[in-house]
Image (tube, rainbow, N blue to C red):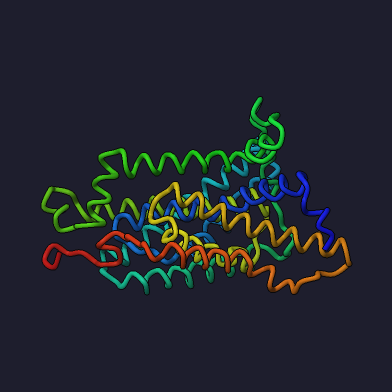
Amino acid sequence: MDWDLVLNWGFAISLVTAGIRLAIPVLLAVLGEIITERSGILNLGLEGIMAVGGLTGFMVAYYIETATSLGATAGLSAWIGLLAGTLAGMLMGLLMAFLSISLQADQVISGITLVVFGVGVSNYLYRQAFTTLTARVAGMDTYPIPGLSQIPVLGEMFFNHTPPVYVTIALVVLVWLLLFRTTWGLRLRAVGEHPAAAETSGISVSRERYLATILGAALVGLGGAVLCVVQLRLYREGIIAGKGWIAVALVIFAQWRPGLALAGALLFGLADSIQYRIQALSQVERGASTLPYEFLLMLPYVLTIVALLVRSRRTEQPAALGRPYTRDRG
């Protein structure tokens, strides 16, 4: 490979810019899972929730854009699609909460059930709704932040993205504030650490866990919608490609903290961006990849696993994570 194509500012800027963009769906899922697990509920169904959120958002945006009678609101189709994906995620979270809280079902089995159900029903509905694999939506244009986007190098990297990128970064701060600087966050963490003590203090464990599971799944569904509506602007089978499982791993990497979740998601996004660009440069240079493309595809997942192994030695998970709670048993 000609390293002059890599060792330059243009390559670095495009690499970081794409890495930030690719990190956003995973980061949203990680934030949602942090909220859920802080309450003591282990939701492994992120892959299925992202698929449902992605398909719902895509279908809503697509039908709004293709409905001539709604042409005046077509510019809002992407935003409405994101909202629809968020609501779909909330419904999946409600199902998870019902299984794991009301029915006291095993949370690992409940989460895997959501994966199988979410991916399966999304693929089935997509096949029924679309006879062509070329259906696409308009998505969103980038929105350069006035002034900041003009800063050399940094402006292009950090201040020239689509609106969901800025919203997600704001959500990192908001989730941190909610968890560690509000009374609700204190109640939520108490439920996840010592549910019996929290119940004795007058906190409804079931209510807090229901709320956390639904709110967390809403962010996961939004992550799927951002991926399908804003970034790829399409839906296809296997589009989530393991990002839900990566999000579960990054929660452990982040030690259930939103700030470290941002770092972990950016690590995954940069690794994903690197493999795309190495493939592209190899094809431009020789007409075929100089490395097996399977190796490049697995690069972001391998780096995520390595980072997880390094951080997992100091894991401090919520004490009641994955443990059903009843007043009789505690």
Q: Residue at x 37, y 70 (%)?
A: 110
Total numbered badges shown on the rendered structure: 0
Q: Residue at x 57, y 58 (%)?
A: 268
Tell me if residue 250 can be seen. yes
Q: Nearer the viewer, residue 182 or 50?
A: 182
In the picture provided, is 314 more to the left or to the right than 265? left
- Rendering quarter of residue 227: bottom right
Residue 178 picture location, percent across and down: 35, 41
Residue 215 picture location, percent across and down: 39, 50
Residue 86 picture location, percent across and down: 48, 50
In the picture provided, is 66 more to the left or to the right than 95? right
Q: Does 164 appear above or below 233?
A: above
Q: Residue at x 67, y 34 (%)?
A: 155
Q: Quadrant of the C terminus?
A: bottom left
In the picture provided, is 255 more to the left or to the right than 162? left
Residue 124 picture location, percent across and down: 58, 70
Q: Quadrant of the N terminus?
A: bottom right
Q: Nearer the viewer, residue 254 or 243?
A: 254
In the picture provided, is 32 more to the left or to the right than 284? left
Q: Nearer the viewer, residue 167 or 50?
A: 167
Q: Looking at the image, which residue sits at the far top?
A: 147
Q: Does 107 appear above or below 138?
A: below
Q: Nearer the viewer, residue 242 or 271?
A: 271
Tell me if residue 70 can be seen. no
